[in-house]
Structure formats: C-alpha cells, structure tokens
C-alpha cells in the first residue's frame, strides 16, 4: 500500500479485509524500539509510516507489521 493513503482509508481497507467494522479494530505496530503502539489517531499513523520508512533502509519499499487484536 502506498504511504500517501490517508489513515481513514487505511482503516477502511483493513476492516474490509478482515470482515470487521472500523470501530472494532484495535491495531498496533512495533515502533523503532520494538514497543507496540496502538494506532488511534493521525500522529500514531504518521509514526507507523515513519517506522516503515526507517525499516526500508534505503530500499524503495518498507515493511510494517500490524497486529489486530
């Protein structure tokens, strides 16, 4: 997924993929220190994208693992 996808669209895509509603999603990602951070707002989403860019280490694409609880 491209990094310019707005947070709301990202949440909608994930909810649809797993047959859930956006309100039922509890998503987390691991930041650069390995701490799991909840995706609750735009600042969390921007941190997730920054983490993916950092993990890319100069490659064109980064990877970000999202946990859904």
Image (cartoon, grey):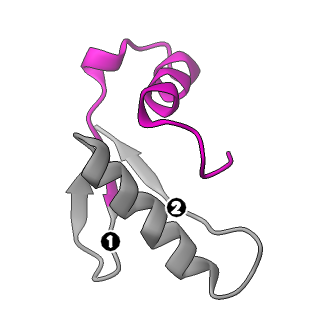
Q: Is residue 39 above or below residue 35?
A: above
Residue at image location 49% in from the left, 58% down from the top: 65
Query: How far apart in space, not on screen, are marks 1 and 2 (Cα)?
Result: 9 Å
Q: Residue at x 51, y 26 (%)?
A: 9
Q: Nearer the viewer, residue 18 or 54?
A: 54
Q: Percent position (x, y) of residue 16?
A: 54, 16
Q: Which residues are magenta?
A: 1-29
Helix, strand or loop at label 1? It is loop
Q: Pointer 1: what residue?
A: 31
Q: In which quadrant of the rendered view does residue 57 lie? A: bottom right
Q: Position of residue 44 (x, y in %)?
A: 28, 53
Side of 31 relative to 5 (left or right): left
Per the image, label 2 sits on a secondary structure element best described as: loop
Spot occupied by residue 31 in the image (x, y as percentages of width and height)? 32, 71
Rendered-image quadrant of the C terminus: top left
Q: Which mark is residue 57?
A: none
Residue 1 in the image: state x and y as whole percent: 67, 45
Corner quadrant of residue 63: bottom right
Pointer 2: what residue?
Answer: 64
Q: Is residue 24 magenta?
A: yes
Q: Residue at x 45, y 69 (%)?
A: 50
Label count reads: 2
Which residue is farthest right?
60
Instruction: Give the left or right position of residue 55, taking residue 35 as reference.
Output: right
User: What residue is at 43 percent from the left and 51 percent from the top?
Assistant: 66
Name the residue at the bottom extreme. 57
The answer to whether residue 67 is magenta is no
């Amino acid at each position: 997924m491209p990094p310019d996808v707005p947070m709301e669209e990202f949440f909608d895509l994930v909810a649809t993929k797993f047959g859930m509603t956006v309100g039922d999603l509890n998503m987390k990602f691991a930041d650069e220190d390995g701490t799991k951070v909840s995706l609750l707002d735009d600042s969390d989403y921007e941190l997730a994208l920054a983490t993916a860019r950092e993990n890319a280490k100069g490659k064109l694409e980064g990877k970000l693992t999202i946990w859904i609880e």
